[in-house]
Every structure is written in C-alpha cells, then in structure tokens.
Image (tube, coloured by chain):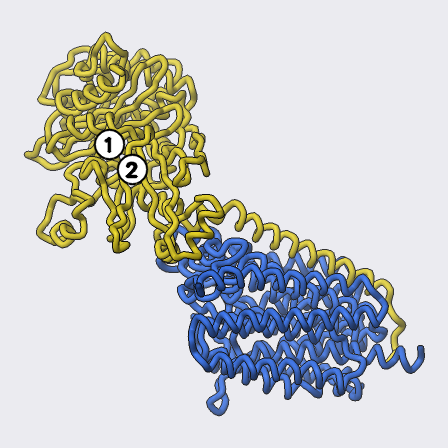
C-alpha cells in the first residue's frame, strides 16, 4: 500500500511544484499589487501542501517519529520567516521570500531523505543564518557609506582567499575551507559578495581607464588565487561576474570581448598547466572510459537522473546515496532521481525566476553602485546554478559548486542568505524612495 | 546617493546579458530534456548502474528469445514466489546469452533494462501494483539463430575456440560460440570451480569477443590491402619465386610445413598463403604504412560493439627492424586480434567496404507480444572503398577455388575466404583460422572460426565454416 501512496504522491508533488512555478512567472504579468499579493498567498498554500505531502511520505517510509517533530519545526520556521519579514519590511518583495522558502523546502525534503542528521544540522544553520541576516536589508537601507570603502572589500577578500590557499583544509584535492575555533567555513562563499561590493564601489567612483586597470588587476588576483587553490568553480564564477559587471559599468564592448578572449586563453593555459583541469575535462568528455575512477561520480549521477526519468522513482525508491558527495554538489541529481525530471526542471525555473527578479531590481536602481551590486550578485547566483546543474547532468565539465539554498553546507547557505538579503534591501530602498517622492 | 545620472545604456546591457543567460538556460534545459527523452535508456542500461537491480523487486525478469521465438532464457516463478532463471539450451548459448547473478554479461547485461521494464497494459499494471503482484518484464528478441548456433557448436566440438556468424549487410549476429563453456543453469554451484586459480580452461571468457590471438595468415588481407593501396597500378605485376624458405640476411621465413609454391603472382601467393611472398612484399611497404592502415581497420582502438571486448593490438611502427617486418607482414609477431574483429573485417569486405554495426537485439516486446522497440541496422565505419573490397573479395574467392580454402569449395554456393595457421608457441600446433563469406557475389553470411592449437586453418577451421554454410544454404 505504501508503494501506491508513494507512486501517487510523486505525481502530486510534481503537480504542486509545477503550479508553484507557473504562479512564479505569472506574477510578473500583473502590476496590480493586490493581484500579486494573492499570487504569493497561493504560492504559500501550494508550498505547504508540497511540504506536507513530502514529509508524510518520509514519515510513512521511515516510520521514524523524529520526522514529525522535524516537520513541525520547519513549518514554524517558514511561518515565522515569512510572517516576520512581512511585519518588519513592509516594502519587501514577497515573491523573493517565497522562492527562498521554496528552495529551502526542496532542500530539506531531499536532505532529510538522504540523512536525517545532516538535514537537522542544515536546518539549524539555516535558522541561524536567517536570524543573522535579518538585519541586512536595514543595513543596506540605512548605511550609505557602503560605497565608500572599496579597498576594504577588495583587500579583505583577497586576504581571505590567500589564507585559504596557504593554510586551507584540503578536500577532494582542492583548498576550500578554513577551520577557526573548531568551525570550518568556506571563505570564498563570502568573498563572492565582498568582491561584488568591491567592483561596484570602484566603478561607482570612476570608470576611467586607470580605474578599470586597477580593478581588473585585483579581480585577476582573486581568480588566480582561486585557481591556485584548485577551486575552479569559484574562479569561473568570479571571472564571469567581473566581466559582466565591467561591461555594464563601462558599456564598452571592447572590454567585454577582450576580457572574454583573455578568459579563453587563460582556460586553455590552465588546461595545459594543471592536471586537475584536464582530469575534469576528461571525466566530462567521456566518463564511460574510466567509469571506475574519474568517471565514477558523473556516471552515477547520470544513472540517477536517467533512472528517475521525467517523474522520478519516488522518495526512498532510488539510490541517490550511490553518488559521491550527493548532498553537496550533486544534490540536483538526487532531486531528479527521486522527485523526477519535471520537478528538477521546476527547481531550475524557480532559480531562474529569482535571477530575473534580481535583474529587474538592477534595472530599477538609479545609483550605479546599487545597480551594479544587484546585477553582480544576480550573475553570481545564476551562474553558480548553471555550473552546478550543468555539471551534474554532463552539460559542462563538473566544477564542484553547490546549488544555492538546496545543497548541504553552512557557508553556502549563509552567503546566499546575505546575497538575497542585500537584494531585498535594495528593493526596499527603491520602494521607500518611490513612496517618498512618488 | 544620486551622484551619477541613471544610465539607460547600462540597463540595455543588463537586458542583453539577461538574454544571454536565458539563452544558456534554454540550452541547459534543452539538453536535460533531450537526455531524459532520448538518451536515458542507453545510459542507464549499464552494469555499473545498481539501480536497475531494484527494478527486480517489482518486475519478473523477461524472456530472451531467438529470432524465431525460441526461448533462450526465462524466469520460472515457484508458488512461494521464488524465482529461478532457466536456460533451456544449457551451455549452447552460455557466453552470448550470459548471466546476471554473478556480475552481468552477454545479452543478460545488454538487455537488462528491457528485461526489467514492464509494458503490460496500464490497467493490469495498476491492478498488479495495488495487489502487490509483480509485473512481467518485456521480452528481448535477439538476432540469434538456434540452428546455426547448434551447427557451429557441434562443428567446433570439444576443441577450444570460437565461431561468429554474421549477416554482413545488416550486422546481425546470428551465432556466437565460445568453447570451452559452462552451464548457466548451474553457474552458482560451479562458480568457485570456474574462477579457481587451478582452473586453466577459462570457460567464462567469451573467446569470440575477448580472446586475443595472433591473426596468422588472415592478416594477409591487411597486408595485401596496404600493398594494393601503395601500388594501385602495378600490384598485379608482383611475382615471387617460392622454394619453401625465404631467406633475408640472417633471417628465414618458412611456408607452412615448408611447402615450395614455385613461381607466384600476388593472387596466387594470397590463395596459397605463401609466407615467403608476403614477407618479401612486406619489406617493400612504406615504413609505418601498415600501422596507419591497421588503426583505420580498428586495431588498437574501440570496436563498434556493445558486448565487452578486448582491443586488438598492432604495434609495428615505422622504425621496425627487418625481422619484425617479416613476421608482422604474415600475421605473426606481436599482432593480436579477437575473432570478432576478424569477423568485422570480413563483413566489411563482403559489404562493399562498409562495416555494419554488429548487433544482437532485434526488438523488444511486452509480455503480450506487442512490439515496444525495434532496432535497425546501423552503418559503422567505412573501412575501405568499394573497389578495394571487391578486389579483396576476388582474392579471397581464389583462396577457395585454387588455394588453401578447398574445404569450403562446393558447387552449392560460392565461398570467398582466407585461412590462417597462427604460430603462438614453438613446438605447439598452430591456431587454425578461417574467415569468409558466401555467396561471393551477393554475400548473405560471414563465418569466422578460430580453433586453438589444432593445426592448419584450411584443414581444421575451414571445415567448421563449411558445416555452418551447409546448414544455412540448405534451408
């Protein structure tokens, strides 16, 4: 009987997330605030249904009472997060809050299925992150001096990355994290944000050739240190983000094209110089040739996605744990395997929806500092999604980056909360301005 | 904060970049959809995918059948639900049908996904699922022909070796025998004996696709092709005077049992498999020419096969010494190839130079016999031009009419082929090879035979092929 329920539930969950995604895009069709508010309300309802269905299955299948308590804790979290945001930030963009919650919800479903303990740990990290980043929109609103300290962002970020390179912990052959007081964290996740602030603040004060050269130099230093730490995914994200920001700040096609050209040369150089780059490319080009070794992870991921098909195997019906590091970089494969390809597609579309919202906010900002921040963070976010998803379905070589808000990992989730908080702050800033002068 | 004016240009560029990103995601999503719709089956049907075993919890493994519907493997379900895989023909199809309990091989591995997928009608499926009854998996109908398999199996007898029978025009594998063999019905009981270190028989090895043998004189097909390519106008003028021993400096190459063939043209040397002539001819070839050609002919690389296979190897480079050239030109030396590879080369000659991809699964049906999938012939590599293929087939025809292939000389059907007697260890009998096809003008069947440590190709291997051709052409 349980099998039948699981079978039915997977179609139900696919339906729920499809409706949610549809609402997410239909939101943009309406400019009437009342309509928009209603859509957000419907989304919350759908999300609650999806959450309930998934946790019912998790409980039925595991027969572990802890799931009930855990479920209730999550419900309280969502209610509190959405409710408090509404209370304190009258001018917030609700759809962004919803999308964050939806992505967290998907993450907690798949994480609880993979490992209850990890899911619980992740939950507390998220709760702490939510609390800690609560104030960010306020800071963005009140402290206009944020644009005055570019070199603090730049040098601090670079220093942190250099520290990781020199004394970082080694995981899977790359230096990614630092351990301070027993807590391990990934500085690159935070430097991502300070980097965008650095570039935005610099270009805000000037975009003359001297300034461009100086910023480019610092940006190149960031990328170089990341490459030396073998953190290729981050290196690529920093590079692309910088190039896009440079282009938007200067409106100069020459910079864009020569930057892209330099990027291509640099990646070919990296391919020739570093064996780990060649390994990644080889594992992508033909993972079947070395299926026991270098190709193991990606082929297991393809088996997961393929076996799941459009509608998935159903929760607990697949073998996502066969994929190494499934709860971090390969979480998308686990979602696709058990919840289905359509579900996974909807997750991509929700991420894309967030990005479009970021771009709209960037477009509305007057001051180029804020514009560049919204734009830069948006590019960073979506490009990371692209690398993560593209890597696990073998669309591009795997670069080992996490799927924001869904993957397991404290630094990733905290920095994503900061990122969304800053954007939310910009939106509120704009909205308040409009109210003051409009 | 509004120190700078709002920048409409910047917004335009933001929009542009947004389009680029959206474009990237369209590609990503398109690829994802394409993978799920079209690539998934071929990807997940892999012995490394442990997930498929899970399917067996809900599906009774389907049947494997010969092309005319005879059962090669089926799953018997006892009243208590215990499942046994039954192989009605015992060891006859041991390697090509394979097994799935102790690792997966053969058709049990190739068809694993289909056998564990059920396409019974939706209502029946739902009712079964609700009442916890397993659904019946799909049937895999193979290209195998029981009569030809039996003929090949019997003709090979208790000798070690392998036989492959293919349709050159389609790539269908009609029979594939490897001996010694094992009985898949008692595989689990026999397993320890089969894999024990004291067992030197290697019964589990599919010699047809994984056994590596020196090709012996069958390699002269490659040597002669290289010679024709290098001397397109003058190759027919080649002559050689054979006294049974060809001496070149300190080295001597002997013909089989020291036979003196007398004055030989290239066609005669090929038909009589004159080693002296080919050793001399090999010295005339461009250094490295054979290496390039052999790589074009699938040596040292991947073969278009879905079964597990060993890579054939050809190592002689352009810096080879005289002895290595003499040996390699006649198929001795360090060259090694699988019987399946030889069968593919022969099939390409028979099919005007194009190798059709060998395949074993003809179609998939659900338990009620409705067709679910059908597999069609696919062109593989173009190994040689049509003209070259026709020259080779002319040469191979003469092997049968006036040379070493007399055992397949018959009025009933015209065969073209090549024999080989490959030395592999001094003092031991040679491996006997025959590879050929018939009828020569409109080839329908290629047969490749290797019999280990048994004697000459013409006397030992060709009669095996004859037995198979006889069965095929007498129906």
Q: Point out the tag, 1 or 2, that comes first from the N-terminus.
A: 2
Against A362, residue B182 (above or below) is above
Mark 1 → mark 2, Cα distance in angstroms: 9 Å
Q: As displayed, is residue A330 above or below residue B28?
A: below
Indicate the quadrant where residue B328 lies: top left
Q: Is residue B49 left or right of residue B40?
A: left
Expressed as whole percent of the image width and height from the top left, the position of residue B347 reads: 34, 25
Question: Looking at the image, which residue is at 44% across and 44% down?
Answer: B119
Viewer-proximal residue among A342 and A233: A342
Question: What is the crowding at mark 2: few (fewer than 14 residues within 10 Å), some, or many (at least 20)?
Answer: many
Residue at 77% x, 65% y is A27
Marks 1,2: beta carbons within 8 A:
yes
| Discs 1 and 2 lie in a common subunit | yes
**Residue A326 placed where, x, y %?**
46, 68
- Of badges 1 and 2, nearer the viewer stands 2
Please, which chain is the residue tagged with disc 1 on?
A: B
Q: Please give the letter of the chain rendered in blue.
A: A
| Identity of the residue drawn at 75% across and 82% down | A86
Q: Which residue is mark 2?
A: B314
Residue B461: x, y in percent? 17, 25
Seen from the viewer's position, the closer of residues B41 and A209 is: B41
Q: Is residue B371 left or right of residue B346?
A: right
Give the yellow chain's letter. B
Q: Which residue is mark 1?
A: B328
* Picture quadrant where residue A349 is located: bottom right
**In what quadrant of the picture does the N terminus of chain A appear?**
bottom left
Secondary structure, mark 1, is: helix
Give the secondary structure at mark 2.
loop
Which residue is the extreme one toward the bottom?
A181
Q: Is residue B413 left or right of residue A37?
A: left
Residue B292 is at least partly visible in this image: no
């Amino acid at each position: 009987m349980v099998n039948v329920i699981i079978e039915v539930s997977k179609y139900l969950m696919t339906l729920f997330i499809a409706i949610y995604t549809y609402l997410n895009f239909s939101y943009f069709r309406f400019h009437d605030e009342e309509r928009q508010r209603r859509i957000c309300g419907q989304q919350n309802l759908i999300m609650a249904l999806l959450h309930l269905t998934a946790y019912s299955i998790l409980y039925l299948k595991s027969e572990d009472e802890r799931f009930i308590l855990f479920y209730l804790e999550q419900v309280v979290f969502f209610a509190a997060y959405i409710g408090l945001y509404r209370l304190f930030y009258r001018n917030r963009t609700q759809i962004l809050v919803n999308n964050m919650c939806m992505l967290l919800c998907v993450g907690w479903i798949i994480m609880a299925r993979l490992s209850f303990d990890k899911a619980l740990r992740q939950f507390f990290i998220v709760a702490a992150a939510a609390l800690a980043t609560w104030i960010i929109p306020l800071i963005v609103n009140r402290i206009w001096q944020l644009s005055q300290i570019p070199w603090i962002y730049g040098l601090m970020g670079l220093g942190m990355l250099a520290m990781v390179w020199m004394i970082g912990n080694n995981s899977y052959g790359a230096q990614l994290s630092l351990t301070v007081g027993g807590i391990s964290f990934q500085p690159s996740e935070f430097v991502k944000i300070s980097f965008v602030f650095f570039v935005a603040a610099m270009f805000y004060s000037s975009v003359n050739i001297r300034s461009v050269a100086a910023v480019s130099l610092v940006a190149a230093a960031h990328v170089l240190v990341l490459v030396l730490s073998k953190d290729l995914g981050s290196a690529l994200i920093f590079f692309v983000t910088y190039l896009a920001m440079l282009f938007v700040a200067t409106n100069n096609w020459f910079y864009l094209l020569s930057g892209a050209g330099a990027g291509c040369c640099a990646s070919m150089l990296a391919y020739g110089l570093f064996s780990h780059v060649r390994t990644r490319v080889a594992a992508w080009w033909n993972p079947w040739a070395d299926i026991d070794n270098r190709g193991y992870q990606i082929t297991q991921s393809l088996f997961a996605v393929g076996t799941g098909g459009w509608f998935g195997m159903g929760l607990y019906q697949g073998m996502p744990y066969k994929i190494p590091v499934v709860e971090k970089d390969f979480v998308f494969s686990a979602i696709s395997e058990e919840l289905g390809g359509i579900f996974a597609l909807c997750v991509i579309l929700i991420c894309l929806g967030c990005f479009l919202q970021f771009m709209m906010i960037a477009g509305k900002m007057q001051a180029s500092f804020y514009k560049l921040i919204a734009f830069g963070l948006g590019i960073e976010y979506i490009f990371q999604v692209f690398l993560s998803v593209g890597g696990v379905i073998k669309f591009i070589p795997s670069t080992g980056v996490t799927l924001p808000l869904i993957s397991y990992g404290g630094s990733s989730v905290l920095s994503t909360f900061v990122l969304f908080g800053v954007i939310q702050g910009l939106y509120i800033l704009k909205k308040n301005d409009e109210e003051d002068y409009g | 904060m509004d120190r700078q004016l709002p920048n409409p240009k910047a917004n335009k560029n933001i929009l542009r970049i947004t389009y680029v990103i959206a474009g990237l995601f369209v590609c990503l999503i398109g690829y994802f959809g394409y993978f799920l719709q079209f690539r998934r089956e071929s990807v997940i049907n892999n012995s490394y995918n442990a997930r498929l075993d899970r399917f067996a919890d809900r599906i009774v493994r389907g049947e494997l059948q010969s092309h005319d519907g005879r059962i090669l493997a089926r799953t018997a379900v006892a009243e208590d639900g215990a499942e046994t895989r039954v192989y009605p023909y015992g060891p006859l199809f041991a390697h090509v049908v394979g097994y799935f309990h102790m690792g997966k091989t053969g058709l049990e591995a190739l068809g694993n996904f289909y056998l564990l997928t059920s396409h019974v009608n939706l209502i029946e499926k739902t009712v079964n699922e609700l009442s916890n009854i397993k659904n019946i998996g799909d049937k895999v109908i193979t290209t195998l022909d029981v009569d030809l398999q039996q003929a090949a199996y019997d003709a090979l007898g208790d000798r070690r070796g392998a036989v492959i029978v293919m349709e050159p025009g389609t790539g269908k594998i009609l029979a594939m025998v490897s001996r010694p063999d094992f009985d898949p019905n008692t595989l689990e009981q026999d397993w320890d004996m089969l894999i024990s270190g004291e067992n030197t028989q290697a019964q589990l090895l599919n010699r047809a696709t994984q056994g590596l043998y020196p090709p012996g004189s069958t390699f002269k097909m490659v040597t002669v092709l290289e010679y024709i390519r290098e001397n397109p106008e003058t190759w027919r003028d080649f002559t050689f005077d054979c006294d049974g021993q060809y001496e070149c400096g300190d080295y001597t190459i002997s013909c089989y049992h020291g036979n003196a063939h007398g004055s030989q043209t290239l066609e005669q040397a090929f038909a009589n498999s004159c080693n002296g002539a080919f050793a001399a001819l090999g010295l005339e070839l461009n250094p490295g020419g054979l290496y390039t050609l052999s790589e074009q002919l699938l040596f040292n690389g991947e073969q278009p096969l879905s079964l597990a296979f060993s890579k054939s190897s050809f190592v002689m480079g352009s810096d080879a010494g005289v002895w290595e050239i003499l040996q390699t030109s006649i198929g001795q030396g360090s060259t090694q190839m699988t019987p399946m590879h030889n069968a593919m080369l022969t099939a390409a000659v028979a099919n005007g130079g194009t190798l059709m991809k060998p395949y074993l699964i003809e179609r998939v049906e659900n338990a009620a016999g409705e067709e679910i999938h059908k597999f069609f012939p696919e062109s593989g590599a173009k190994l040689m031009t049509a003209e070259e293929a026709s020259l080779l087939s002319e040469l191979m025809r003469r092997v049968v009419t006036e040379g070493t292939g007399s055992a397949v000389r018959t009025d009933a059907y015209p065969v073209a082929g090549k024999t080989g007697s490959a030395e592999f260890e001094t003092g031991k009998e040679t491996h006997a090879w025959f590879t050929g096809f018939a009828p020569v003008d409109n080839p329908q069947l290629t047969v490749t035979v290797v019999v280990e440590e048994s004697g000459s190709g013409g006397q030992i291997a060709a009669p095996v092929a004859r037995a198979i051709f006889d069965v095929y052409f007498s129906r």
